[in-house]
Image: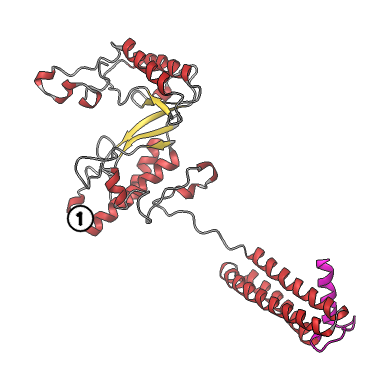
Amino acid sequence: KGSQTGNPTSGNCGGCGRERCGKTTINFLKEEAANLEVIRKLAARYSKSPAYLGFEIANEVSSSVDSLATMSFYQKAYNIIRRHSEDALIVIFATFNPSTFPFPNFQNVVEDVHIYFGMGFGHPTLDQQVNKHHASKTVSGLLWPVFVGEWSLGASGQRTSSMSRADSEQFFADFARMQLQVWETYTTGWFYWSYKTAYANSTWNFRDMCEGGWLPGCTPSLSYASTEWWREPSCAFAYLDGRCPPAPVNVGAALTASSLLAVVGLAVAGVAVSVLQPELAGKLRARASDSLGAAASAASEAWARLRAAVPVVADRTTAAARSLHARARTWLERSSAGGPRSPDSPSAGLASEKVGLTA
């Protein structure tokens, strides 16, 4: 009650400039008792709801009011909200930068900032890296966590109407990704203003911008990063600069798995040659040969990737692996003739070694 902004959006008819509504007034502090009672009733009614995230005390407070009286109002409102919820998020608008005021007991509070390029925030440039630096500097320099309570793809000051269709679409796509990257990297969260407007294809219309693919959630071309931000690296939120690269191939694991597969095949064939009937031994040798072929195929792909990443290591690994493969193949060929191998034979030594490894 009494309006904190003097604008029609705060319920002040005088903000419309219509004479019948009277003058614009900013008297919310004079109506403190009534406003605190409204806060109490709302907190009591909704604080137990599973949909209740938090409470913003006053939106876009005018800088023309008394700053100390405003901070006193915030303290009283905070105490009321906390009586009904110990962990609700309490949001306070950025006027007078309340994060610098020495409140004695504030916890789980965030500062609400509204950022519109070209509307008190500087005109956007065609260079999104410049825009990103400007935005990130603004939201990362506050003492409290920051909540971007309003933003949009409105690019006031940038004459996108004179661009070609392709250039305009690319600008807005990058402009959106730039802001998403900053808000999700440096702030607690954000709200787009607004969800839907009376006229279509407006940069203030989240629904249309989403369905057009410039904002995430509506098309396969752009999706949100994980909400479990504490599990994610910062690159997961790099909408503009490119998300995290694919996980590197674990060449060591691939080689190990391939080697183990070959070892198992060789061990089975070695035991079969030594103690089983020739017919069964032949079948097992055939299986070992197939396993060795599959292992060699898998390892070849891993070697190719390793060679591209680390040539010197790859060369040495390739030489060692080829030597192992050659020895295994020689042993299989000799064992196919049947009968146990001499303990002095290199192939028998290989088989004994592999059997020992798998015991």
Residue 356 drawn in magenta: yes
Three-letter residue code for mark 1 = Met
Residue 88 image position (x, y, % from top left): 46, 26
Say which residue label 1 marks.
163
Other residues around mark 1 within 10 Å, as few (<14) / some (14–19) / many (≥20): few
**Quadrant of the rendering where the C terminus is positioned:** bottom right
The quadrant where residue 270 appears = bottom right
Q: Is residue 273 left or right of residue 134?
A: right
User: Which stretch appears magenta?
Assistant: 335-359
Residue 224 image position (x, y, % from top left): 42, 48
Residue 94 drawn in magenta: no
Query: Can you say whether 297 is above or below 221 in the image?
Result: below
Name the colouring of the figure: secondary structure
- Residue drawn at x 11%, y 23% as measured from the top left: 18
Q: Is residue 213 visible?
A: yes
- Residue drawn at x 38%, y 17% as measured from the top left: 41
Residue 163 image position (x, y, % from top left): 20, 55
Between 211 and 128, which is closer to the camera in this rendering? 211
